[in-house]
Amino acid sequence: MNIETLRAQIDKIDDELTRIFTDRMKISQLVSEYKKDNKLMVLDRSREREILTRVTAEAAPELEVYIKTLFQTLFSLSRSYQNALLVKDSPLAKEIHKAVAETPALFPTKAVVACQGVEGAYSQIAADKLFSLPNMMYFNSFEGVFRAVETGLSRYGILPIENSSHGSVTQVYDLMKQHNFHIVKGLKLKIDHSLLAKTGCKVSDIKEIFSHDQAIAQCSEFLEGLKGVKVTVVENTAIAAQMVAQSDRSDIAALSSHNCAELYGLAALGVDVQNNSNNFTRFICISKKLEIYPGANKISLMLSIPHRPGSLYEMISKFSVLGLNLTKLESRPVPDKDFEFMFYFDIDASVVSEPVVNLICEIAAGTEQFDFLGNYSEI
């Protein structure tokens, strides 16, 4: 046989597979209606295992693995279709639609905004770029920012979540599991660190440098060139500058933003001392209320995934089916639970698309822990 004849046979089989698959999904719809009426879970592992045992027993040995993969894919598609039919009017779908309808057309220009640190912190600089007139509240910790938003002390909070050269701010991701919030805006901020000290001080005079651990990591190459200098971690880069300005010592310096030089009356002994000149940090603006502004094109989700082979693949494949681009996947261990993780997904998508809303609700219905963190734009 030539290749054209073989392809013609495959085409004929594909047409038959399409017809059979369509019939199977129609029956899946009837199954979902029965499960809904009888308050049954969509997922039935024992039924799936029974089918796998039967079909692989009938397959040639060299095809058993492929048959298993085929039917596992069918199960996943069938569950997805059933869940989509069941979640159209779910509470989460209603909450998302309500947020889209009630959120104003324009992002506010002024508001009470919480951030970690003091005046001059990168979070404060990010707030100034998002709001024309932010009423700033400063807290010693990231948790303080979460609590301020959660309790209504501030309408918004600004938090760093990722640096282009040093990765995720894991402390913020760990706190996400403990607090109720939504992301309403994102920002990428260019980060340029300077070595700040008192006027008249020289680099050779410096015996100790203060800064945040992220800034220290981002300036590791510069610091390695300073022999015999102690590096001390503090809560924030701006706090480091403030400490230097208020100290009686003349042999200390801070890795901080150049803005802090003017704010705290310090001199720059070195500018742009970070390892990478293309150094950016992603910040999120959070609120207690779900707000979805026009133009929102990024979705963030937080969820748990069963600890079994293939569960992460099954989750990611759901995004792939809709052609959605997964831009970030972060995992963090769940405290006091061995080998269990919370996963954080960033997806290029909008809830203006009803299939996207259905997918989010389907995922929520099929996972033990789930949080829709928000749909927002990033500048």
Image: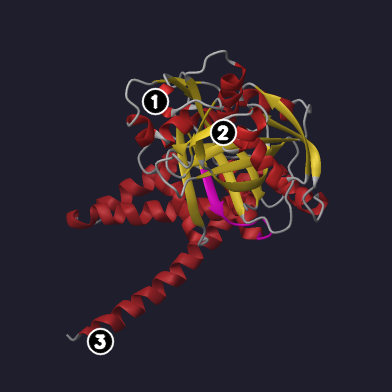
Q: Which residue is mark 3?
A: 4
Q: Disc 3 versus disc 1: distance between alpha carbons?
A: 78 Å
Residue 312 in the image: state x and y as whole percent: 42, 43
Q: Disc 2 versus disc 1: distance between alpha carbons?
A: 54 Å
First along the sequence among labels 3 and 1: 3
Q: Is residue 31 visible?
A: no
Mark whose residue sits in front, 2 or 1: 1
Q: Residues within 10 Å of mark 2 (few under 14, many from 20)?
A: some
Q: Which residue is mark 2?
A: 369
Which residue is at 24% across, 53% downward?
64
Name which quarter of the figure residue 35 lies in. top right
In this rendered view, identify the residue nearer to me: 165 or 101. 165
Up the image or down, 280 lies above or below 223; here it is: below
Residue 204: mark: 1
Q: Secondary structure at mark 1?
A: helix
Q: Is residue 265 visible?
A: yes
First along the sequence among labels 3 and 2: 3
Which residue is at 49% across, 52% downward?
327
Residue 277 in the image: state x and y as whole percent: 44, 48
First along the sequence among labels 2 and 1: 1
Residue 323: mark: none
Q: Is residue 96 left or right of residue 196?
A: right
The magenta region covers: 345-353
Q: Secondary structure at mark 3?
A: helix
Q: Residues within 10 Å of mark 1 (few under 14, many from 20)?
A: few
Q: Amino acid at mark 1?
A: Ser
Residue 290 in the image: state x and y as whole percent: 73, 42
